[in-house]
Image (cartoon, coloured by chain):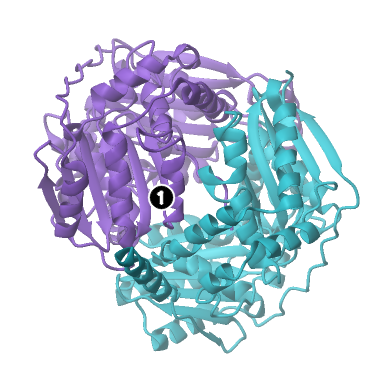
Chain colours: A cyan, B purple
Amino acid sequence: MRNKLIVLLSLLIVSSIGVAGPKIENWQTKNGAKVFYVNAPELPIVDLRMVFDAGSARDADKPGLASLTNSLLDEGTGELSVDQIAEQFEGIGARFGASSLRDMAVTSLRSLNDKAVLDKALDLFSNVVAKPNFPEKSFQRNRKSMLVGLQVASQRPNSIASKAFYKQVFAEHPYAIDGSGTEASLTAMTRQDVVDFHKRYYVAKNAVIAIVGAVSRAQAEQLAERLTSGLVAGEAAPTLAKVKALSAPVMKRVNHPSQQTHILVGQPGMHRGDPDYTTLYVGNHILGGSGLVSRLSDKVREQRGLAYSVYSYFSPMREDGPFTMGMQTKNSQADDALALLKKVLKEYVDKGPTEDELKRSKQNITGGFALRVDSNKKIIEYVAMIGFYGLPLDYLDTFNAKVEAVTVEKIKDAFKRRVHPDKLVTIMVGGDK
Amino acid sequence: MRLASTIIISMALAISVMTPLQAKQGKGGSDVRQYMLDNGLKILVKEDHRAPVVVSQIWYKVGSSYEYNGVTGVSHVLEHMMFKGTKTLGPNEFSKIIAANGGRENAFTGKDYTAYFQTLHKDRLEVSMRLEADRMHNLSLRQEDFAKEVNVVKEERRLRTEDKPTSLTYEQFIATAFQSSPYHHPIIGWMDDLESMQLEDLQHWYERWYSPSNATLVIVGDVKADHVYRLAKKYFGPIPDVKIKPVKPQRETKQRGERRIKVRAQAEVPYLLMGYKVPVLTTAKDANEVYALEVMAGVLDGGSSARLAKELVRGKQIAVSAGAGYNMYDRINNLFLFDGRPATGHSIDVLEKEIRSQVERLHTTLATKDELDRIKAQVVASKVYELDSVFYQGMQIGTLETVGLDHKLLDEYVSRIRAVTPEQIQAVAKKYLINEGLTVAILEPENTKKEVAVKQEKDNSGANNAK
């Protein structure tokens, strides 16, 4: 008995030592870009992320513009053609990346920290991001390619469901826009639209830079200045409108010639920095965020064998992102599965989790903290997110303590206030029974 | 950040081979400690003390290429059933214990392997060893659990294959390219075989293949190798070995001419797959050929500066995507693959002709020094980048060992790639990229909406119709 107690105590000590996240340092470049830096000297690698508030939430009446602009960054800059840019990055083994989400336009670079290699990679990266020249030929090609992408998406029930879901959950809010665009908007888009979008949003005051790697603070400062020297200061993007809560349930069925019906159920959820963030995060972890051991997986997959994948999650964004529950099942049992999904949610909102469920989830989240930050790749994603959303620099350090403070009562209270089973959007995409 | 469900993945159903070089160069031999238990379990430990975590993977030498008609998919269904309890654990309890210890876990089945893994704080490694050893020999296969789980797998097949036109095309393509080779079978199994699968098929499969001498334990992370060995000996040591009857060779019968199929499916956009029969590292008489094929995949598709992206997607703009891929670490002979989607206004025939002329160019013209230099620079950098992931390092070691290769080959990779000459690439192109060994599959969309879309695009651009 006694021995056991000592073992338990020592485990507790170990886990409380292990909770500190990486040390994040923070400053601004001369022209106003925010920089977030973590020194990671173990591997001779440097990771960079330059994130702009230039995702599809900024598309306005031109859906697809943010994504198209982002995809064209490495198609030409100064004297360099698209082929030369690709050859130069790849010739030094550097990896350039660009992607566009709803809130963020992300650009990234991974390079060896060897001085000559890193210098060249930085030159290319900063020019590609700050001074792309958007050749007409590339504009036309990527625009057409996005149109084909729309066709490909239209053969996928999950894409159809996701687009319909955002449209219903966010209605008039910019989050309703699908970043892949529409046939009409892409067809009408011009190169000048792209030039204007880049000029407005790819500016220093609208940028957050994350640096993780084997560079000193002094080097990181120089590096950030070089990265932003080509950017005009500009202005931060305006504040987005608040997301409105749904006033009534919405049910939408889309006929699609698939064997399975894809089901999405949800509503507006929470935002980054939300006072209920940790409570809803832990609460959802129990409900549908912990894989095979979640309540949804137990009821739908383990006990009934109805689906391969069933889940729920909050996507916290600048404003309230969606709370989503999802699954896919063969058409003939889709209605039953949907009823079960909703029943599990309703029960959870009414009664909350059990003490045992909460304990297990806390153990999983806090005990697995080290896994969240065990690589430079994972660390830079956190650092960029913390920087972009203006979260406290000790976000990771305080994470476990906040999780520990969650109680069954807090989860019940937060879910009652924030999740409304009587006002859900339901999307079903699938074929006939 | 999305926290979706943990998924039991079937690797390689997605055509992940399409990114040839980035995915597989390696370090990871010389600093790997190797042990062997008396019952034949091999243990490979790579210490990596950067973060206080450890990944534990157990690899069994069994997968869809060990299967035969009537029981296809049995390796993968058994993988699912491995979470359903043992003599002492109830269904899903394995996952619950790992979760309560802060761990993440999953499993994957491929053509040549079935593997289970946990990622944990380093202090919890013993938990995973204890549980993994338990289900290596104490699995309880119960009819009630099986009846539900096989339905889960059928839903997985619908999700991954039936409702994905490109996956359907790939499945038919592979089944056409391979006649007597077990690579013919889809990893997830034919739906009909899933329908008729019995609990006793699983019992038989478990007894036949789940044995210490048919497994490799790979541990990477913040651990001491000798400590890992002691733990492994404690938990896996007592498991009796079952002599494994080796799998039959089932070599592919000689292909005698080009094969072509059409796959009509509910889809919007056509898709092309082409594959040439090639050797792999386990079968090649001359390993240089394999490394030459690897570099050839890089010449074609080693990034945005490589030929397919530069010439087909950007230059001639006849494809919205085009790829080439080769997996040198397969267990038996496989394909050198091409795939692509035509750009609007271009037909699938034009795309095929362009890919064929790329092949022809490999026959007639040497790759340039610049091209090879770029591939080699990427290989050198990737070797460093991959150290950022303990999981990936484990994947590499486990894959090689499980197909019968020495993991120390990972150490040679960079120097072997560097040694490849333009002449060697030309020689393997001439020898293997030939019509006698070619299979072509074309996805023909069955959808009236498509005609409308093509017509509109034609009106807009004045380009040639796809039909």
Can residue B325 be spotted in the picture?
A: yes
Check the image and report above or below for A86 versus B115: below
Quadrant in the picture for residue B226: bottom left
Query: Residue B262, percent across and down?
Result: 52, 15
- Give left or right: position of B120 versus A381: left
Q: Quadrant of the N terminus of chain A?
A: bottom left
Judge by depth and name the residue closer to the eye, B363 or A187. Answer: A187
Q: Residue at x 55, y 22 (%)?
A: B443
Quadrant in the picture for residue A161: top right
Q: Residue at x 42, y 49 (%)?
A: B97
Judge by depth and name the residue closer to the eye, A39 or B421. Answer: A39
Q: Residue at x 17, y 59 (%)?
A: B227
How many circles with numbers are drawn on the protein? 1
Query: Residue A54, percent across and down?
Result: 68, 65
At label 1, which amino acid type do we have? Gly
Check the image and report above or below for B265 versus B320: above
Chain at numbered mark 1? B
Query: Residue A384, percent across and down?
Result: 54, 71
Looking at the image, the residue that sits furthest to the right is A247
- Give left or right: position of A167 versus A295: right
Which residue does the numbered mark 1 point to in the structure image?
B303
Classed neighbour count for the residue bearing mark 1: other residues with Cα under 10 Å, few (<14), some (14–19), many (≥20): many
Query: Residue B222, percent across and down?
Result: 27, 64
Element under disc 1 = loop
Judge by depth and name the residue closer to the eye, B315 or B49. Answer: B49
Can residue B304 be spotted in the picture?
A: no
Looking at the image, the residue that sits furthest to the left is B38
Q: Quadrant of the C terminus of chain A?
A: top right
